[in-house]
Amino acid sequence: MSGVFKAYDVRGVYPDEIDEKLAYAIGYHFRGILDAEDLARGARVVVSRDMRASSPSIAAALSDGLRAGGLSVVDIGLATTPMNYFAIGHLATSGGIQVTASHNPARYNGLKFSRRDAIPVSSETGIARLEELVRANPAPSGPARASLETADIAAAYRTHVLSFVRRSEPRLKVAVDVANGMATLYRSLLEELDIDLVPLFFGLDGSFPNHEANPLKPENIVDLQRAVRERSCALGIAFDGDADRAIFVDDRAGAVGADMITALLAGPILERFPGAPIVYDIRSSWATREAILAAGGQPVRERVGHSFMKATMRRIGSPFGGELAGHFYYRANFFADSALITAIEVLNEVRRAGRPLAELLAPHRRYASTGEINFRVEDKDGVIRRLAEQFGDGAVDYIDGITVQYADWWFNVRPSNTEPFLRLVMEARTPDLLAAGKERLLAILGRPADESHPS
């Protein structure tokens, strides 16, 4: 069973690894990881789902389990993961569960958990405990002990998201690829952003007939790049399956690293919140830190993962944070991630500057980078020890895996939270330095794996 209980969610192949029986049991035991205060005053849990064929039955079983365990359910139906987060905060519930497998192929499904105020539940803060409860205590079948209500949050969510719009001129042509995923629900919202929308693969279809809903894989943004090029778009936006991540394409059809978007947005956000701390993950470019400093902010490095990013942002009151995987977080959005709000903020900045996106990004694209490369490694700890020995003459830290920084280049190697991989990100001041450093690292890490994953 432990194979489906991950660092940040429950996820597996349906029905072999995750099914309605497991969903019911998880719902029944969910009260075991909620705050006693919430339970004492009558806990309510938001339940929503994505468009996968198995999601309706998984969500129904989950709701039955929650109610059998004494938790009232607020069913908001089909929703993106950011809509689930918003509903938790907006409706002041005790938590929420989104039925989704995010960017994974059609045969997968899963569950993402939050406590009140959309505070994420990770392995360290509840998922491991939830697994223990499910393993040790079979969930009894029986009548529901708590209520079921439905709620329509579409109007409130529209008002919330549109509150981030600061400029509506000039009108821009924007290509948007939703990969038949949940961002299909955003079509009317996108059309309210005063853009000429070039839509790609709208229409909910959990079989993902056009391409995988993982925009981090270069092959999955080829159609978007073609649309930007052929339709002369100002930019392109690719959403993942549950619409909590966004990857951008500039006006020259070039893929934009998410750390470059963090660097781009740091300036305008710090204009609104002078001197504030901005959080970014350890894989991000030196240019991200430098952009935050140049705008008068406080750069704060954090380990990879939305639970860590959000916890740090809450602790220090950060208005904004970004991860290389395409998650962007906002204090004004319950510290939760929102791909749609990020699209709005990028449009705000392109309109404010009156310059093409590629031109705005050019000053930040001054380093050579490998991107994230995966290596299938059995002895992860042993390899990290070897790296520490081999590169001990650099500035070493262990915030997440190992990071080594030199004057002209740096690298991070960290164990995947979800897969049997070590993940490498390396950056250097010149392509030659990048090639030389990469060669040294490959001598220890071996040949790269073929797969690419976001977290």
Image: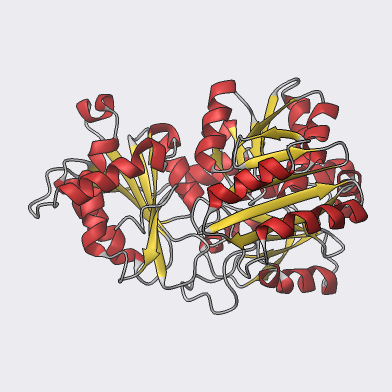
Q: Residue at x 59, y 64 (%)?
A: 214
Residue 388, located in which quarter of the rendered image?
Answer: top right
Q: Is residue 173 visible?
A: yes
Q: Is residue 67 left or right of residue 376?
A: left
Which residue appears farthest toward the left when viewing the image?
Answer: 142
Q: Is residue 182 left or right of residue 36?
A: right
Note whether 185 is above or below 333 in the view shown.
below
Q: Residue at x 57, y 36 (%)?
A: 309
Which residue appears farthest toward the bottom when viewing the image?
Answer: 209
Residue 11 drawn at (x, y percent): 40, 59
Note whether 127 is above or below 236 in the view shown.
above
Query: Total of numbered circles in the picture?
Result: 0
Q: Residue at x 53, y 65 (%)?
A: 181
**Location of the N terminus (image quadrant):** bottom left
Residue 22 drawn at (x, y percent): 24, 59
Of residues 447 and 50, which is closer to you in this image? 447
Note whether 322 is above or below 190 in the view shown.
above
Q: Residue at x 80, y 59 (%)?
A: 439
Of residues 185 and 112, which is closer to you in this image? 112
Q: Is residue 122 left or right of residue 374?
A: left
Residue 12 drawn at (x, y percent): 38, 64
Of residues 141 and 76, which is closer to you in this image? 141
